[in-house]
Amino acid sequence: MAEEYVGEAFSEIEVFEKEFRGAILEDCTFENCRLQELSFTGCRFVGCSFRRCVLTGLKFREIQAFGNRFEECSLAGLNWAELLDVRKREMGFLPFDALLRCEARHCVFYGLDLRKQDFSQCDFSGSYFEECNLSEASFRQARLRGTSFSHNDLRSADFRGAEEYLFSLENNRAQKARFSLPEVMNLLVALGIIIEDF
């Protein structure tokens, strides 16, 4: 019989190298927890809240996750597209409602509708955004070292105060996106423009 947790609160737990099958977690809260090297198959995560948690080395198969919230979490190496089937992604569902001040390094965001998401002060170093709708999203004061943006809608996105971004304006739609000096100069370099002092 599958494990089912509804409205449960978990605090300061550590779980390593465990496999979960068919587990259901709804409206649960996790605070100061470490969940590492876990495998989830056929599980559901709905409306859960994670605060100051470490989630790394997680593997997913046939997962449904939506309406979850992450605040000040370390979320290394997650493929967010794997947390929803294609049909739900096309309907605009997301595995999370919020990523607030998180370290989401080396993560994959593919084909997600991330319009108006607030990613301020997040660290997306080494992450990959492809074919996402990021229009009006905020990356203010985000760290984007080695982050790849490919074929995204970045119209009216806000990159003011963001650090270390470098992406092509030719394969991303970026009309009315906002940037600040000096980092915006990286976009000119990506276009092959030579900038010289005189």
Image (cartoon, grey):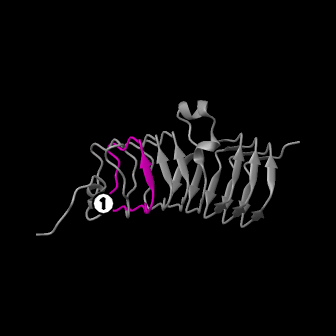
Query: Can you say whether 21 is above or below 93 in the image?
Result: below
Percent from the top left, x then y, of residue 69?
Answer: 58, 51
Percent from the top left, x then y, of residue 135?
Answer: 38, 42
Can the viewer see residue 66 in this picture? Answer: no
Q: Which residue is drawn at 50% across and 59% down?
A: 126
Q: Residues within 10 Å of mark 1 (few under 14, many from 20)?
A: some
Q: Please state, as top left, top right, bottom left or bottom right, where the N terminus lies in the image.
A: top right
Task: Name the main secondary structure of what is drawn in magenta.
Answer: loop
Percent from the top left, x then y, of residue 176?
Answer: 27, 44
Can the viewer see residue 20 in this picture? Answer: yes
Instruction: Work out whether residue 2 or residue 125 is closer to the camera in this orientation and state it.
Output: 125
Q: Does the magenta stretch include residue 148?
A: yes
Q: Residue at x 32, y 44 (%)?
A: 170
Which segment is the magenta one? Answer: 141-162
The amino acid beneath tag 1 is: Asn
Q: In this view, does 195 lie to the left or right of 84?
A: left
Residue projecting furthest to the right: 1
Instruction: Work out whether residue 197 or residue 28 is closer to the camera in this orientation and state it.
Output: 197
Q: Please state, as top left, top right, bottom left or bottom right, where the C terminus lies in the image.
A: bottom left
Determine the secondary structure under disc 1.
helix
The residue carrying mark 1 is 186
Q: Residue at x 54, y 31 (%)?
A: 90
Q: In which quarter of the image is residue 61?
A: top right
Percent from the top left, x then y, of residue 94?
Answer: 56, 41
Instruction: Work out whether residue 57 or residue 138 is closer to the camera in this orientation and state it.
Output: 57
Q: Is residue 80 left or right of residue 155?
A: right
Q: Is residue 169 magenta?
A: no
Q: Which residue is drawn at 23% across and 56% down?
A: 193
Residue projecting furthest to the left: 198
